[in-house]
Image: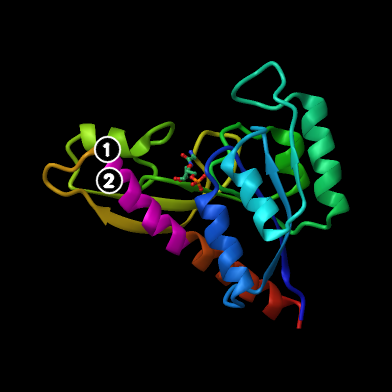
Amino acid sequence: MRRLALAILGSGRGSNCRAILEKIRDGTLLADARLIVSDVVDAGIVGVAREFGVPSFVIPEGKWRTKLEPEAEQDLIRRLREAQVDFLVLAGFMRILKSPLLNAFPGRIINLHPSLLPKFPGRAAWSQALEAGESVTGCTVHLVDSGIDTGRIIAQREVPILPDDSAEALHERIQQAERELYPAVIAKLATELAEAST
Ligand code: GAR
């Protein structure tokens, strides 16, 4: 049976990457993590890759903070193709992807965002929800397009905002939900692929 081949891209701590790799390791997620990619040389996610023995590489920082250099993006595409990756899983990857990469993996790049999109795209979405006086926020898994946190929504999970919540406590509660939702969505994609290839 064919297993879903993943690349996981992140710029931060790597807690979602860890949650995905744990599910792969315990056999509840039938996928292979082929490559872990970061744009931050000392990001936690690079250490997670090492810990789980998954090949990783760091994209050169380049001159822009929000997007990749065109050469770096081409090199990334080459490496992803070489690793025969089916799906790109963005887990806190803080660069906007451009058309070469989007066209190389059409409909096969997913992102996780800490709000109930389309509400509160962009940075620190949990603080945005808190400041807006919402009583519920959550997290969203969506297909990636050329916008910022836009693209077709695949799944969402609600998280309550409690009276006297701090931004830190709310963020942690959302991240707990993310660590359940993201592997579950990927597991569903893996099942669909397995069924399509039998
Ligand atoms: C996650 O909370 C994810 O929702 C967010 O980055 C965090 C990465 O955490 N992504 C975005 O805000 C995308 N716009 P992690 O490195 O611990 O997985």
Identify the residue shown where x is 62% and y is 76%.
191
Does 177 appear in magenta?
yes
- From the viewer's perspective, is residue 3 above or below residue 33? below
> Where on the picture, by quarter, is residue 84?
bottom right
Residue 187 picture location, percent across and down: 57, 70
Residue 107 visible in the shown view: no
* Disc 2 residue type (three-letter): Leu
Query: What element does badge 1 sit on?
Result: helix
Is the CB of the residue bearing disc 1 within 8 angstroms of ligand 1?
Answer: no
Residue on which disc 2 sits: 170
By secondary structure, the bulk of the magenta-drawn segment is best described as helix
Residue ranking furthest to the top: 63
Q: Nearer the viewer, residue 178 or 55?
A: 55
Query: What element does badge 2 sit on?
Result: helix
Identify the residue shown where x is 70% and y is 77%.
194
Residue 127 picture location, percent across and down: 29, 34
Q: Nearer the viewer, residue 58 or 185?
A: 58
Q: Is residue 193 left or right of residue 181?
A: right
Q: Residues within 10 Å of mark 2 (few under 14, many from 20)?
A: many
Residue 134 visible in the shown view: yes
> Where on the picture, by quarter, is residue 3?
bottom right
Q: Nearer the viewer, residue 184 or 52?
A: 52
Measure how far apart labels 1 and 2 are at the Cα level. Answer: 5 Å
Identify the residue shown where x is 42% and y is 31%.
123
* Disc 1 residue type (three-letter): Ala
Q: Is residue 11 left or right of residue 162?
A: right
How many marks are shown on the rendered structure? Answer: 2
Find the magenta span and give its range: 167-181
Q: Is residue 45 left or right of residue 80?
A: left
Residue 108 picture location, percent across and down: 67, 54
Identify the residue shown where x is 38% and y is 33%.
124
Residue 167 is labelled as 1
